Image: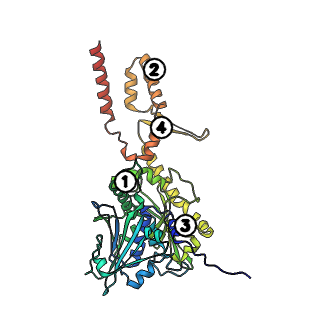
Amino acid sequence: MSRFADAAPDPKSHIKTLMRIGYTMSSAVSDILDNSITANSKNIKIYSLLGLKEINLSIVDDGDGMTPEELIHNMKIGCKNPSDNRSRGDLGRFGSGMKTASFSQARRLTVISKQKGKALCAAIWDIDRIENENTWCLEILDETEIKSHPLILIDELKESGTQVIWEKLSCLNKTNHSLDNETIMASNLSDLGEYIALHFHKFMDGKNKINFSVNNSLLQAIDPFMTRASGYQEGRSEKLRCKGGYIEINTHVLPHFKRMNDNSLERLGGANGIVQNQGLYIYRENRLINAGGWLGLAKTSQLGALARVEVNVPSALDHEWSTDVKKASLQLPPRIKKELKKFLSDPIKRSKRVYTYRGKEDQANKYWNINENQINKTISYQISSDNALLSEIFNTLPKEKQSQLINYLGQLAENLPLNHIYQKMSDSPREISQENVTDALLESILSRVFEEKINE
């Protein structure tokens, strides 16, 4: 007759597995921010107090806070059933995010919380203690220990809030060739600010907006669709009914690079970033999960660089969309793939039209002819023979000089640096400037003639 044995995972081994789920610092902090948003926070502040013996990180919010009983429950791994229904706006799912995100970045997690009308409470997970004792030993602090904690930032006089503290940061492990910890942390915080500004941009506007800051620097939202910029185009929109409510699909076309200001272009990663990040922007309860890429539904192209498709998904569809623990990736259900394909052609065509229009503007000048041979499927760029100034110069030259001029202009057109122009137009189009090339050419020629006369 069969029997049953307790095969619960060994705490020492299990914690090492949880530490390697695969968060970056930005995605790990975002999991903490999800909890703060769900707790109705209006101000979320991230601090890394420098100058201490060991670098640390704190996320402080003014949300609902927790009672001691709620805190102990929420410190458990998998404290929620992922199959349970979530209320609209609840960014949680597995009940493990705060812990797994924290364990991936730090060996010591402290959570201090206060609910309205209640005293402060705090608990600590210390990976060193778990490994040494091989038990899930959660440390509960008393009131005196909480108030004397060297990193406490929560004001006990305030109504409510929570502080998550990361210590003994494993994400700063160095090799002999690495930068010092403070330099690494400064770079991580800069990346974190950009990540939050993009992935939580929908929470940063409107009457219920949330303020996010990093070391007292208030973050400004990054709108990946540039909806308020001159030249932005709004495309087709539709709502698809589903068991959790609606999936909302909106299409967008960004302005051409030439119409973007330098700051907007830089915040979207420059021209190269805009090209690479064309595609689908999928949101779960207004939080960005997938930032660009066509997920196999279309090909990335230079002409489609300005096309964006926004998809808003309710958390009720997490199972169908295979949302992972980190809430950083998902899979498109077959039905949604079929529906989305209907929306892709419009923004891509609009993006191509913007480029085509700019191309026609460039083509309409008196110096160059752009010849497109439909039979041979070739395009060539030729110096215009109809230019009045060129004709005037040509007619003043003797025949032998006329031949030299024609030969020179032909070689000039043949040696147009097309590959370099394409690369720079893709990476940094706003850096290209042709405004003073005539003066520069004249100065260069005169300087060369002057040197030749001296050498004579």
Please rate how many residues cluster around mark 1, counting C-alpha atoms within 10 Å: few if below 14, some from 14 to 19, many from 20: some
**Which numbered disc, 1 or 4, marks the residue that appears first in the sequence?**
1
Badge 3 amino acid: Leu
Residues at badges 3 and 4 in contact (C-beta under 8 Å)?
no
- Between marks 3 and 4 in the image, the one whose residue lies nearer the viewer: 3
Q: Position of residue 16 (x, y in %)?
A: 50, 65
Residue designated by label 2:
403
Residue designated by label 3:
330
Q: Image point 31% across, 77% down: which residue?
A: 146
**Which numbered disc, 1 or 2, marks the residue that appears first in the sequence?**
1
Badge 2 amino acid: Ser
Residue designated by label 1:
266
Badge 1 amino acid: Glu
Badge 4 amino acid: Leu
Residue farthest toward the front in the current orientation of the protein:
133
Residue farthest toward the right in the current orientation of the protein:
1
Residues at badges 1 and 3 in contact (C-beta under 8 Å)?
no
